[in-house]
Image (tube, rainbow, N blue to C red):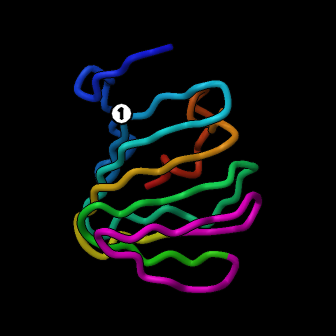
Amino acid sequence: MKHYRLREIPEEQVTDLFARRFFTGEKITLAFLTMKNGCAVPEHHHESEQFSHIITGSMRFVIGGEEVVVRGGEVVHIPSNVPHSAVALEDVTGIDVFSPIRQDWVDGSDDYLRRK
């Protein structure tokens, strides 16, 4: 058992427009995200199945070639290994859940996110 206090998890400023706090278990990564309007996540794919819950704001996702706008209070499911990208249409707070864990986030090899 582990107990976490969100405020005690260091916030990583990935780019000027994107920050995150995340932790991993054996099979799940849970991430708390903040993105400023215009933040773009380039097309990528990963082994992890993903749920993205937008708490406030809105994002335009392109998932497997299909576009969807996800707003506060909505969730989108991204299957494993499906190419996807996203753009914040306004300031966003959200929660992402990944299984299996995002090893590239843990070891810092997620270069696609760090490009400006």
Direction front: furthest residue: 1
Kindly identify the residue that appears in the image at 52 percent across and 47 percent down. Answer: 97
Kindly identify the residue that appears in the image at 40 percent across and 51 percent down. Answer: 95
Q: Let me know if residue 20 is in the magenta part.
A: no
Amino acid bearing label 1: Glu
Magenta residues, as a range?
64-85
Q: Is residue 55 above or below residue 74?
A: above
In the foreground, 10 or 56 = 56
- Secondary structure at badge 1 equals strand
Residue 84 occupies quadrant: bottom right
Q: Let me know if residue 80 is in the magenta part.
A: yes
Q: Is residue 10 left or right of residue 100?
A: left
In the foreground, 57 or 53 = 53
Q: Position of residue 83 (x, y in %)?
A: 70, 68
Query: In the rendered image, which residue does mark 1 sit on?
Result: 12
Q: Position of residue 102 (x, y in %)?
A: 63, 38
